[in-house]
Image (tube, helix red, strand yellow):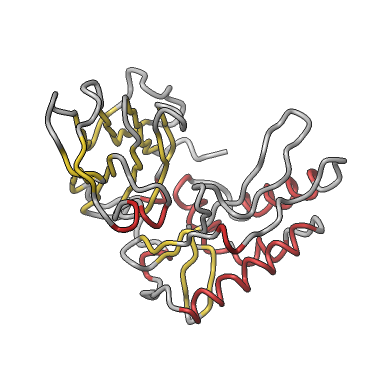
Amino acid sequence: MAGKDTLFYVLECAVEGCDAEFYINDVPIVLRGPEHGKYYGGQCNQHLVDGINEIEIIINPGPTPGEALKGKDGVRRRLTPDKEAKAGAILAVYPYGAVVRGPERKPLMSAHWTATENTLEFFPKVVTGIADLGPLFGQWDWEKSEALQLDDPTLEEIEELLSKLYQSLLTGDPELYIKTSQARFKNTERAYGLNPGKKEDLVRLGTRSDSRQHWWGLEPLNPTDFDFRLCGRNRLVEIVNKDWEPPLKELADDEEGVSTYPMLLGKKDGVLEILL
């Protein structure tokens, strides 16, 4: 359980008549649109930094994560959007126990876009909102990680780690995943006032419980589907497929629910870790 003094920062997103991908501080959070759901509301304490923070909305992004900002084949296109098209995001803060969009909601910053009727625009289009939020949680491990390049050696290193995580989880053993996620767990616990070891215990319990079920298994890894991309000011790599889904994905359970293992990798002291 989170500490009762913890403040919860929530990114609230809505779209109409367009696709939009939402970022906080250059870290992708969620894709929304007609085929992805119109609304989103998620806690984001661990994505916020002391001082200046930025919300970005990519309107009508390219068809894959790697093309989101550049457009299909690296080409932005001039289109007339739906006259009702719009997208917006608000960062709000809530005290412990408050209801999202309830009376205790305090908006802090926002970004919005609305189409102008019968007006051509270039897409993908980026709109931003910036605010100085002052001191928050201190510096995160991902802020201190090494700058990266998606060159061949780095990609090979990422794929090797992903393969090891896959093989370990496939047997129902979460220990390598837990070891690789230590920085993320500790940062998340700090962000939400959780007891040390809480996140680790939840992952261990959940994976071991699921792995005993008759439906247990992971979707095969397919390197041709990978679409890793740099983010977080080039300090993180999002591990994602071309369909915007994480490559590490469990098989559907009896209720057709699917658990995934989203991750952003970074390097500390030359070693790849799951940092966010």
Residue at 26% in and 46% down? 124
Compare residues 33 and 90 and report the one nearer the observer.
33
The reply, left or right, for residue 107 in relation to residue 100 is left
Where in the figure is residue 98, as x and y percent of width and height? Answer: 42, 24
Using the image, determine if residue 34 lies above or below residue 245.
above
The reply, left or right, for residue 261 in relation to residue 143 is right
- Residue 11: quarter of image: top left
Residue at 39% in and 64% down? 230
Using the image, determine if residue 255 lies above or below residue 230.
above
The reply, left or right, for residue 248 in relation to residue 38 is right
Count of picture labels: 0
- Residue 19: quarter of image: top left
Residue at 49% in and 81% down? 270
Where in the figure is residue 70, as x and y percent of width and height? Answer: 29, 55
Compare residues 67 and 246 and report the one nearer the observer.
67
Where in the figure is residue 147, as x and y percent of width and height? Answer: 36, 74
Residue at 40% in and 57% down? 66
- Residue 197: quarter of image: bottom right
Residue reaching furthest top?
103
